[in-house]
Image: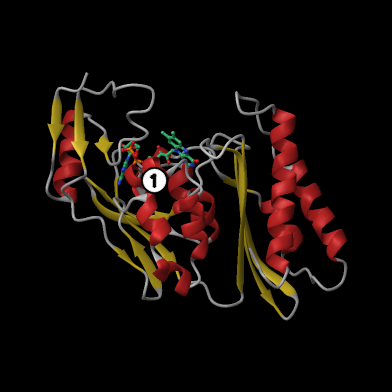
Amino acid sequence: MVQHFLRPASPAEAVALRKDTGGPYLAGGTDLNWMGPPSAATLVSLAALPLAFLRSDGPVAEIGPTVTLQELADHEGLSTVGLEVLRLAARQVGNRSIRNLATVGGSVAANKPTSDLIPPLIVLDGTVRLVTDGGEQEMTVEQYVAAPPAEALIVELRVPRPDSALRVALQRFARSANDLAVVNAALAVRLVAGQLAEPRLALGGVAPKVVRVPEAEAVLAGAEVGKDLAGLLDRFAEAVAANIAPVADQRGSASFRADLAVQLARRTLAACVTDKGG
Ligand SMILES: Cc1cc2nc3c(=O)[nH]c(=O)nc-3n(C[C@H](O)[C@H](O)[C@H](O)COP(=O)(O)OP(=O)(O)OC[C@H]3O[C@@H](n4cnc5c(N)ncnc54)[C@H](O)[C@@H]3O)c2cc1C
């Protein structure tokens, strides 16, 4: 049962309280309150921290961790700078009631295997700025997801503004509109004069965390989309199939997840190489 509700006024104070009490950070509370009250005796609320900023007009979009997913979905400035996929990913989460509470920082820190926000953040080469009791550090979202530093407070997400050659596509399959995805996929790839470069594929729901699939990315690097697109799609799909090993859970069997991952990855590629992109 919660006995102490702490409301630090600065990130450094929040980190110190987290370290001293062991109480988790409380952002929107949708994950911490899921299936009943939190078991922790102390909660370190992020509500009083000045971390709800969202600036998208510079070369890097700067997103405060306490921005809600609905605020992210509604932020038209992201579309203007080529980051529409972040709005789309946020819109895909649960329902409006959840999105009005759930935060960007909480979504990344909760580190769910089918988070809707993590795959696009990874393929867009997003980074997190962290405050720890040892000071500040920055790492890619991919590094954070793989090994989140204990007790670190996310104080900013940074996403570079894509140039016009970057194509990005998202795909998702869920049992219902309200449910977490069974599998999701994000692909970003540059398309210059018909040739693909710097592909980044992130898949959710095929491992305990969102993962990239470098073997499938290697199929795309340098490929020419005008030559044998059907063959390229097949080789890409085969590389995905050969390099994932999902496990079963209540949302789907291992083989269902594997099939979904292959089909969704294939669709992201098809979307990226058509005129409309994702
Ligand atoms: C009904 C329902 C449906 C959902 N559907 C989806 C879906 O479709 N897609 C999807 O991606 N997700 C879905 N979710 C998950 C939801 O997105 C996450 O629960 C939510 O994003 C967590 O954010 P929060 O602000 O509520 O975090 P909290 O619950 O407050 O915290 C979650 C975790 O993150 C830590 N944390 C929070 N902020 C920070 C920070 N700034 N720095 C470091 N650690 C921090 C907390 O200590 C805690 O461990 C769903 C959840 C529910 C309840």
Q: Which residue is painted at 86% across and 61% down in the image?
A: 230
Q: Quadrant of the N terminus?
A: top left
Report how many numbered discs are placed on residues in the image. Answer: 1
- Left or right: where 260 falls relative to 224: left
Which residue shows up at 20% across the image and 36% down it? 44
The residue wearing badge 1 is 99
Residue 97: image x %, image y %? 37, 41
In this view, the residue farthest toward the bottom is 193
Residue at coordinates 40% horizontally, 70% vertically from top-left?
Answer: 77
Vertically, is 240 above or below 175? Answer: below
Quarter holding the C terminus?
bottom right
For the rendered model, the colour scheme is: secondary structure
* Residue 7 coordinates in the image, percent (x, y): 13, 40
Task: Let me know if residue 142 appears in the view.
Answer: no
* Residue 160 seen anywhere in this rendered image of the structure: yes
- Where's ligand 1: which quadrant? top left
Considering depth in this image, is 107 or 78 the residue closer to the camera? 78
Q: Would you say the beta carbon of the disc 1 residue lies within 8 angstroms of ligand 1?
A: no
Q: Label 1's element? A: helix
Horizontal side, residue 216 vs residue 28: left or right = right
Q: Which residue is drawn at 72% across and 68% down?
A: 273
The correct choice, above or below, for 158 with respect to 9 in the image is below
Label 1: how many Cα within 10 Å (few below 14, some 14–19, many 20+): many
**What percent of the width, then of the height, locates residue 219?**
76, 59
Q: Where is residue 194 in the image (x, y as percent from the top left)?
A: 75, 77
